[in-house]
Amino acid sequence: MKVSFIGLGVMGYPMAGHLVKAGHQVTVYNRTLAKAEKWRTEFNGYLAITPKDAAKDSEIVFVCVGNDDDLRQVMYGEIGILAGVKSNTLIVDHTTTSADVAREIYEKAKQQNVSFIDAPVSGGQAGAENGVLTVMVGGDLADYEKAEPIMSAFAKFSKRLGEVGAGQLTKMVNQICIAGVVQGLAEGLHFARSAGLDGPEVIETISKGAAGSWQMENRNQTMWQGEYEHGFAIDWMRKDLGIALDEARRNGSHLALTALVDQFYSEAQALGGNRWDTSGLLARLEKNRG
């Protein structure tokens, strides 16, 4: 299939590569041209200099950029995706955004007989590189069924959760749950150190029981060693939690723990941890302990 991929960040770069490996003809666009040129050399794909040019001949346009504003920037305007796509094209947005912007773009695309689904992902950089992401989708069933076999190039699991916006709402649930788990793990390791315990041995033991989690399995050793360069950055987590908290104010949810952990992340940022991975919550506790 002829497809395009807009946005070659830590997630999009390998995701687009998996599409090439699956046999698709892939054209990419990235704001930083040098990165797009590097991708083209590595994967033998095609390069466009605007989103419009990347999208113009594609059956499916994949997007994975930073936030609502970035998404609008590549979608709209004279050189945007919607200026280039042909009728019946499907746009699959893997960006984590608000549900509102997903619904907005869906309506604008529909006016051009273009389809749109919101399809944020979970699994982090490692999941993207290994092609084992989880995709949560909002959109029309027929559009999901068209996208699903193509997304399998980089996803181990995908599911349609409802109409447009449902994917983004589900991603908010995902981030809410992660925030609480990481804070619990940080406090547990902090307590273990303060009590004079061997952290890795403690985790090896308790991970076999009810306390076990993906975060515990994959982040406990690096956290214990004070290494926070292993994935999804605190800046991006705060962006995502901000979206969830905004949505909670609208729908009447009570997210006391999420709001608290968001503030803890702001303290980690103040320590210079903007680009630390989300397990950097422990650094804040260790600083206070010292």
Image (cartoon, rainbow, N blue to C red):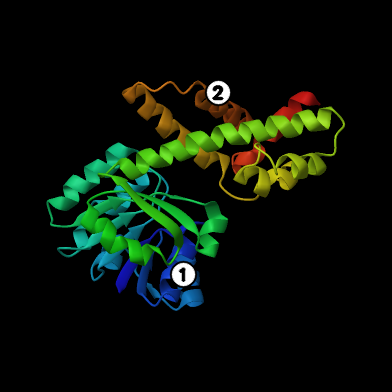
Image height check: is 157 above or below 241? below
SS under mark 2: helix
Residue 9: image x %, image y %?
Answer: 48, 57
Whether the residues at callouts 1 and 2 have beta carbons within 8 Å, the answer is no
How many numbered discs? 2
Circle number at residue 17: 1
The mark found on residue 72 in the picture is none
Q: Secondary structure at mark 1?
A: helix
Left or right, residue 97 beside residue 134:
left
Could you tell me residue 93's position as x and y percent? Answer: 33, 53
Q: Let me know if residue 78 appears in the view.
A: no
Task: Looking at the image, tell me whether mark 1 or mark 2 is earlier in sequence order.
Answer: 1
Classify residue 7 by image quadrant.
bottom left
Residue 39 shown left or right of residue 137 in the figure: right
Q: Please indicate whether residue 91 sits to the left or right of residue 235 in the image.
A: left
- For the residues labelled 1 and 2, the Cα–Cα distance comes to 38 Å
> As shown in the figure, which amino acid type bears the numbered disc 1?
Gly
Residue at 45% in and 79% down: 44
Q: Amino acid at mark 2?
A: Leu
In this view, the residue in front, 64 or 50, is 64
Q: Position of residue 256 (x, y in %)?
A: 50, 20
Label 2 belongs to which residue? 260
Front-most of residues 17 and 46: 17
Q: Residue furthest right?
A: 196
User: Which residue extends farthest front?
Assistant: 209
Most foreground residue, 157 or 126? 157
